[in-house]
Amino acid sequence: MSGHSDEVTVRTPALRSAAGTARALAQRGIDATERLGSLVSHLPDAMGHGASADGFARFAARWAQNYAGKMGELTTVAAGLEAAANHYDKIDAAAAAAVGRAQKS
Protein backbone atom coordinates (compact mmCIF):
# COMPACT_ATOMS: atom_id res chain seq x y z
CA MET A 1 0.00 0.00 0.00
CA SER A 2 2.95 2.34 0.49
CA GLY A 3 3.44 2.54 -3.29
CA HIS A 4 -0.15 3.71 -3.67
CA SER A 5 0.31 6.27 -0.90
CA ASP A 6 3.44 7.69 -2.55
CA GLU A 7 1.59 7.86 -5.86
CA VAL A 8 -1.33 9.69 -4.23
CA THR A 9 0.91 12.34 -2.65
CA VAL A 10 2.49 13.17 -6.01
CA ARG A 11 -0.25 12.54 -8.57
CA THR A 12 -2.87 15.17 -7.76
CA PRO A 13 -0.45 18.06 -7.09
CA ALA A 14 1.39 17.22 -10.33
CA LEU A 15 -1.89 17.28 -12.29
CA ARG A 16 -2.89 20.60 -10.73
CA SER A 17 0.56 22.06 -11.42
CA ALA A 18 0.41 20.95 -15.06
CA ALA A 19 -3.07 22.43 -15.38
CA GLY A 20 -1.87 25.73 -13.91
CA THR A 21 1.09 25.82 -16.28
CA ALA A 22 -1.15 25.08 -19.27
CA ARG A 23 -3.59 27.81 -18.26
CA ALA A 24 -0.78 30.34 -17.79
CA LEU A 25 0.73 29.50 -21.19
CA ALA A 26 -2.67 29.76 -22.84
CA GLN A 27 -3.32 33.15 -21.24
CA ARG A 28 0.06 34.47 -22.36
CA GLY A 29 -0.67 33.21 -25.86
CA ILE A 30 -4.09 34.83 -25.87
CA ASP A 31 -2.59 38.12 -24.68
CA ALA A 32 0.10 37.95 -27.38
CA THR A 33 -2.52 37.18 -30.03
CA GLU A 34 -4.60 40.18 -28.98
CA ARG A 35 -1.55 42.44 -29.17
CA LEU A 36 -0.68 41.00 -32.58
CA GLY A 37 -4.25 41.58 -33.76
CA SER A 38 -4.04 45.19 -32.67
CA LEU A 39 -0.75 45.64 -34.49
CA VAL A 40 -2.01 43.95 -37.64
CA SER A 41 -5.09 46.15 -37.75
CA HIS A 42 -2.81 49.19 -38.08
CA LEU A 43 -0.41 47.73 -40.66
CA PRO A 44 -2.24 48.80 -43.82
CA ASP A 45 -2.32 52.39 -42.55
CA ALA A 46 1.33 52.29 -41.52
CA MET A 47 2.54 50.63 -44.75
CA GLY A 48 0.21 52.46 -47.05
CA HIS A 49 -2.62 50.66 -48.76
CA GLY A 50 -1.33 48.24 -51.30
CA ALA A 51 -1.40 44.57 -52.22
CA SER A 52 1.59 43.69 -50.04
CA ALA A 53 0.26 45.47 -46.95
CA ASP A 54 -3.22 43.98 -47.33
CA GLY A 55 -1.83 40.52 -48.09
CA PHE A 56 0.44 40.58 -45.07
CA ALA A 57 -2.37 41.82 -42.85
CA ARG A 58 -4.60 38.94 -44.02
CA PHE A 59 -1.79 36.43 -43.47
CA ALA A 60 -1.08 37.74 -39.97
CA ALA A 61 -4.79 37.76 -39.10
CA ARG A 62 -5.12 34.11 -40.20
CA TRP A 63 -2.02 33.17 -38.24
CA ALA A 64 -3.36 34.93 -35.13
CA GLN A 65 -6.70 33.16 -35.51
CA ASN A 66 -5.01 29.75 -35.80
CA TYR A 67 -2.77 30.53 -32.83
CA ALA A 68 -5.78 31.59 -30.77
CA GLY A 69 -7.37 28.24 -31.63
CA LYS A 70 -4.30 26.43 -30.31
CA MET A 71 -4.49 28.46 -27.11
CA GLY A 72 -8.13 27.38 -26.80
CA GLU A 73 -7.02 23.77 -27.14
CA LEU A 74 -4.42 24.31 -24.42
CA THR A 75 -7.12 25.71 -22.15
CA THR A 76 -9.17 22.55 -22.83
CA VAL A 77 -6.16 20.42 -21.87
CA ALA A 78 -5.85 22.38 -18.62
CA ALA A 79 -9.52 21.75 -17.83
CA GLY A 80 -8.99 18.03 -18.50
CA LEU A 81 -6.01 17.93 -16.14
CA GLU A 82 -8.04 19.67 -13.45
CA ALA A 83 -10.91 17.22 -13.95
CA ALA A 84 -8.48 14.31 -13.60
CA ALA A 85 -7.10 15.79 -10.38
CA ASN A 86 -10.63 16.17 -9.01
CA HIS A 87 -11.42 12.58 -10.02
CA TYR A 88 -8.33 11.26 -8.23
CA ASP A 89 -9.18 13.36 -5.16
CA LYS A 90 -12.52 11.53 -4.93
CA ILE A 91 -10.88 8.12 -5.40
CA ASP A 92 -8.24 8.90 -2.78
CA ALA A 93 -10.85 10.13 -0.30
CA ALA A 94 -12.92 6.97 -0.80
CA ALA A 95 -9.81 4.80 -0.35
CA ALA A 96 -8.85 6.65 2.83
CA ALA A 97 -12.39 6.25 4.20
CA ALA A 98 -12.33 2.53 3.40
CA VAL A 99 -8.97 2.13 5.15
CA GLY A 100 -10.31 4.02 8.15
CA ARG A 101 -13.38 1.77 8.35
CA ALA A 102 -11.22 -1.34 7.99
CA GLN A 103 -8.94 -0.23 10.81
CA LYS A 104 -11.92 0.35 13.11
CA SER A 105 -13.31 -3.15 12.63
Image (cartoon, rainbow, N blue to C red):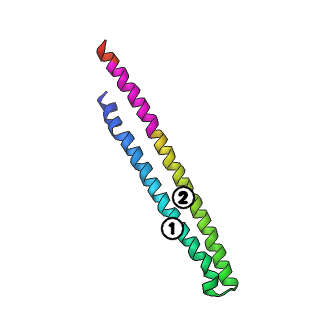
Asked if residue 79 is positioned above or below residue 93 in the image, the reply reads: below
Quadrant of the drawing holding the N terminus: top left
Q: Amino acid at mark 2?
A: Met
Task: Give SS at disc 1.
Answer: helix
The region drawn magenta spans: 85-100
Q: Could you say which disc has been placed on residue 59 in the image?
A: none
- Choose the circle earlier in sequence order: 1 or 2: 1
Q: Residues within 10 Å of mark 1 (few under 14, many from 20)?
A: some
The answer to which quarter of the image holds residue 90 is top left
Residue that carries the numbered disc 2 in the rendered image:
71
Residue that carries the numbered disc 1 in the rendered image:
32
Distance between the alpha carbons at the discs numbered 1 and 2: 11 Å
From the viewer's perspective, tell me whether residue 63 is left or right of residue 22: right
From the viewer's perspective, tell me whether residue 98 is left or right of residue 48: left
Horizontal and vertical percent position of residue 53: 65, 82
Q: Amino acid at mark 1?
A: Ala
Residue 90 lies in the magenta-colored region: yes
Q: Residues within 10 Å of mark 2 (few under 14, many from 20)?
A: many
Quadrant of the drawing holding the C terminus: top left
User: Which of the two marks, 1 or 2, is nearer to us in this view?
Assistant: 1
**Residue extending farthest bottom:** 48
Horizontal and vertical percent position of residue 38: 57, 73
Asked if residue 15 is positioned above or below residue 59 in the image, the reply reads: above
Horizontal and vertical percent position of residue 41: 62, 76
Q: How many marks?
A: 2
